[in-house]
Amino acid sequence: MKQPEDDWLYEISPKRKFIYLNFKEIWDYRDLLILFVKRDIVTVYKQTILGPLWYFIQPLFTSVIFTLVFNNIANIPTGNVPPFLFNLAGITAWNYFNQSLTQTSNTFTANAGIFGKVYFPRVIMPLKTVISGLFKFGIQLSILIVFYIYFLFQGYDLRPNSNLLLFPVYVLMMALLGLGAGMTISAFTTKYRDLTVMVGFATSLLMYISAVPYPLSEVSEKIPELAWLVKYNPLAQIIEGFRYMILDTGIFTWSGFFYTMTFSIVLFLVGLVVFNGTEKNFIDTV
């Protein structure tokens, strides 16, 4: 007599698709994703003296240092925008990308223990980093708004422009860039652990070729032979565009916008392919 087939709730099988992002499966594990996001937000500064105040201290102190070094000593102009506000806007955008990149770049090595014990969509781990980073980004954005209002009352002519409607797109591009680069690096760190150290060093250098402490126009004017290095850096386009829509200063072109959007999507897809390929056998090398 033929036995009836068992009805399985879940079936785990190797992924065969080249680019695989099962949104249904991620949605099924949404409670786990929310749990990881809450854990990141609550525990990141647990057992620290100042706790969440570090969210405020880091951008403020960095902006002060940038203002002293780049604007007061190096005399880099910021037009009609107060140098402190100019730097704070760039640092706010940079910090979100930097956190997304650095914390996703060690996904496999940092979570090898839990990956080896229980199954869930591995892409949840880099996703939760990008989502939880929005909380910190929102706090630092509120600091920017407070100082924006302060300088308005001081008599500065500040105004956003119509590009402010593109704000969600810029946030999405920062997330895609961080995810794509982070997932790619995390795949290689399973074999080459010293890449983790290199990420911190590389991001420090990347900040200075991403137009964070200076306007994009200054590079074209003072170092024209190296201007292409910054101009074709998609992160520089994001930071310049971020300042342009909020402070109405800097350079914005639609060609640069669509170039950055295309680069972000392609890098994310490349990172996803590499991440999915490593996911199948990383436990043997970690």
Image (cartoon, rainbow, N blue to C red):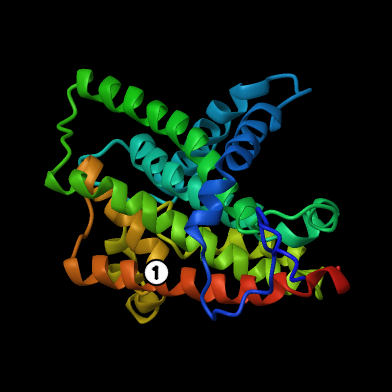
| Between 61 and 167, the one nearer to me in the picture | 167
Q: Is residue 162 above or below residue 275?
A: above
**The residue positioned farthest toward the front in the image shown:** 1
User: At x 25% / y 65%, what residue is drawn?
Assistant: 257
Looking at the rendered image, the quarter that the N terminus falls into is bottom right
Horizontal side of 170 relative to 190 (left or right) equals left
Does residue 285 show up? no
Q: Quadrant of residue 260?
A: bottom left
Amino acid at dot 1: Ile
**The residue positioned farthest toward the left in the image shown:** 162
Q: Quadrant of residue 258?
A: bottom left
**x, y percent for residue 169:** 30, 53
Residue count near mark 1 (Cα–Cα under 10 Å), binned few <14, some 14–19, many ≥20: some
**x, y percent for residue 173:** 38, 58
User: At x 71% / y 60%, what residue is drawn?
Assistant: 6
Horizontal side of 82 relative to 209 (left or right) equals left
Q: Is residue 21 above or below residue 136?
A: below
Q: Which residue is mark 1?
A: 265
User: At x 79% / y 71%, what residue is drawn?
Assistant: 282
Numbered disc 1: secondary structure: helix
| Between 53 and 127, the one nearer to me in the picture | 127
Does residue 29 show up? yes
User: At x 61% / y 65%, what residue is drawn?
Assistant: 183
